[in-house]
């Protein structure tokens, strides 16, 4: 997994920790930067709930990936709650 040493000026330790948790649980270390942006922009309890939902879906029902399900939930939240696209 990437080390986020250079981002400590931009992201809080809580944001970094949550982004790492998301990347690990979704087995998607390549999207760590995106997860950092999510952790900075969106409520952490919403992200954790979305992560739990994505991880609870049986593997047989996943067409693309758990990460895609998670990102889709975040994008839908953003679109319906007026968050700016980054």
Image (tube, helix red, strand yellow):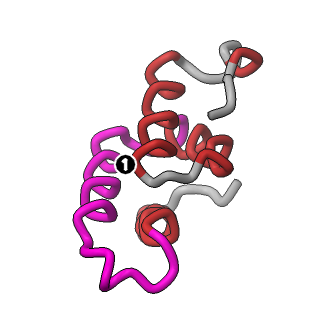
Residue 80 lies in quadrant: bottom left
User: Which quarter shows the C terminus?
Assistant: bottom right
User: Which quarter shows the N terminus?
Assistant: top right
Q: Position of residue 16 (x, y in %)?
A: 53, 26
Residue occupied by mark 1: 47
Q: Residue at x 37, y 48 (%)?
A: 47
| 61 falls in the magenta region | yes
Q: Position of residue 68 (x, y in %)?
A: 51, 70
Side (left or right) of 48 relative to 73: left
Side (left or right) of 43 relative to 36: left
Can residue 81 be seen in the rendering of this structure? yes
- Compared to residue 3, the image places residue 81 above or below, namely below
Majority secondary structure in the magenta region: helix
Between residues 36 and 81, which one lies in front from this camera angle?
36
Q: Residue at x 50, y 16 (%)?
A: 13
Q: Position of residue 48 (x, y in %)?
A: 31, 46
Residue extent of the magenta highlight: 40-65
Between residues 82 and 72, which one lies in front from this camera angle?
72
In the image as oriented, which residue stretches furthest toward the front?
60
Q: Residue at x 49, y 72 (%)?
A: 65
């Amino acid at each position: 997994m990437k080390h986020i040493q250079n981002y400590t000026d931009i992201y809080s330790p809580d944001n970094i920790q949550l982004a790492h948790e998301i990347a690990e649980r979704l087995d998607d270390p390549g999207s760590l930067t995106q997860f950092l942006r999510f952790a900075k922009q969106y409520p952490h309890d919403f992200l954790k709930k979305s992560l739990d939902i994505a991880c609870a879906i049986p593997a047989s029902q996943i067409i693309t990936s758990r990460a895609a399900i998670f990102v889709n939930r975040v994008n839908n939240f953003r679109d319906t709650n007026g968050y700016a696209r980054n």
